[in-house]
Amino acid sequence: MNRRSAIESRKNILDAALTVFSDHGYRGASMRMIAGHAGISVGGLYLYFKSKEELYLTLLKRRLEDLVVKLEKVASSNRDPVDAITQYITISVEYARRYREFILAQSREQGFTFGIDIKKRFFRRQRRLVEMIIRNGIDAGHFGDCNAKEVTRVVISVIRGFLLSIIVDQENLFQPDECVRFMLQGLLKREV
């Protein structure tokens, strides 16, 4: 097997695993189901992943890495901090909506602590990015003087709240543009 087909096979397996885990949950999914969906033998699947848990954690890491790469691109390529925070929140919320079933399956069956080290690394990177955007906004005069670390905690908590709402309170989901408007303008009416 050449390197390219190995990379394609691994991607195919992870795509199949996302579908199967999203549709059947962690407990309901089997390596046989994933192999069938990927169009390979179960033995072929075990060449890439030793267990269902390893496959699931790899998939979780891949999903979070994919998101953080998109967010880092927004943060590093955008000179306008208002646009950067707008895109950051919008991408985060829309990503959670897109992978809602996977998030539901993971939290319902595995709990929030499953893959905790992967999640902690992801959240550290997220905090650094948001804080960088906020500091850039303060320095550029777009944002008012504030404690960037504390505001970062608020922004991250709002995004985590959206994730929690996906799991327990779907009627409480919000639109990214309204979230951004609130974050940037607040509730206070401004005198002109």
Image: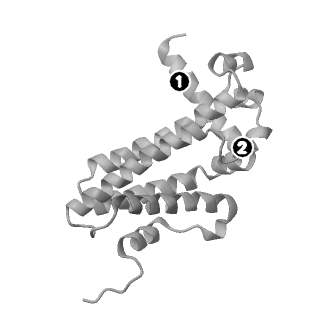
Whether 157 is drawn above or below 20: the answer is below
Which residue extends farthest top?
Answer: 1
Neighbourhood count class around disc 1 (C-alpha, 10 Å): few under 14, some 14–19, many 20 upward: few
The label number, if any, that marks residue 8 in the structure image:
1
Q: Which picture quadrant has residue 53?
A: top right
Whether 45 is drawn above or below 76: the answer is above
- Residue 38 pos. (x, y %): 66, 28
Neighbourhood count class around disc 2 (C-alpha, 10 Å): few under 14, some 14–19, many 20 upward: some
**Residue type of the residue flagged with mark 2:** Gln
Q: Quadrant of the N terminus?
A: top right
- Residue 162 pos. (x, y %): 56, 61
Q: Quadrant of the C terminus?
A: bottom left
From the viewer's perspective, is 51 left or right of 122?
right
- Residue 18 pos. (x, y %): 63, 39
Which is more toward the observer, 76 or 28?
A: 76
Which residue extends farthest right?
Answer: 28
User: Can you tell which of label 1 and label 2 is closer to the viewer?
Assistant: 2
Which residue extends farthest bottom?
Answer: 191
From the viewer's perspective, is 161 left or right of 45?
left
**Residue type of the residue flagged with mark 1:** Glu
Q: What residue sits 44% from the left and 54% below the top?
A: 91
From the viewer's perspective, is 119 left or right of 17?
left
Q: What residue sits 55% from the left and 38% below the top?
A: 118
Distance between mark 1 and mark 2 Cα atoms: 28 Å
- Residue 139 pos. (x, y %): 21, 60
Whether 93 is drawn above or below 15: the answer is below
For marks 1 and 2 on the same chain, the one whose residue lies earlier in the sequence: 1
The secondary element bearing badge 2 is classed as: helix
Q: What residue sits 77% from the left and 31% below the top?
A: 30
Q: Which residue in the structure is indicated by mark 2? A: 110
The secondary element bearing badge 1 is classed as: helix
Q: What residue sits 51% from the left and 21% below the top?
A: 7
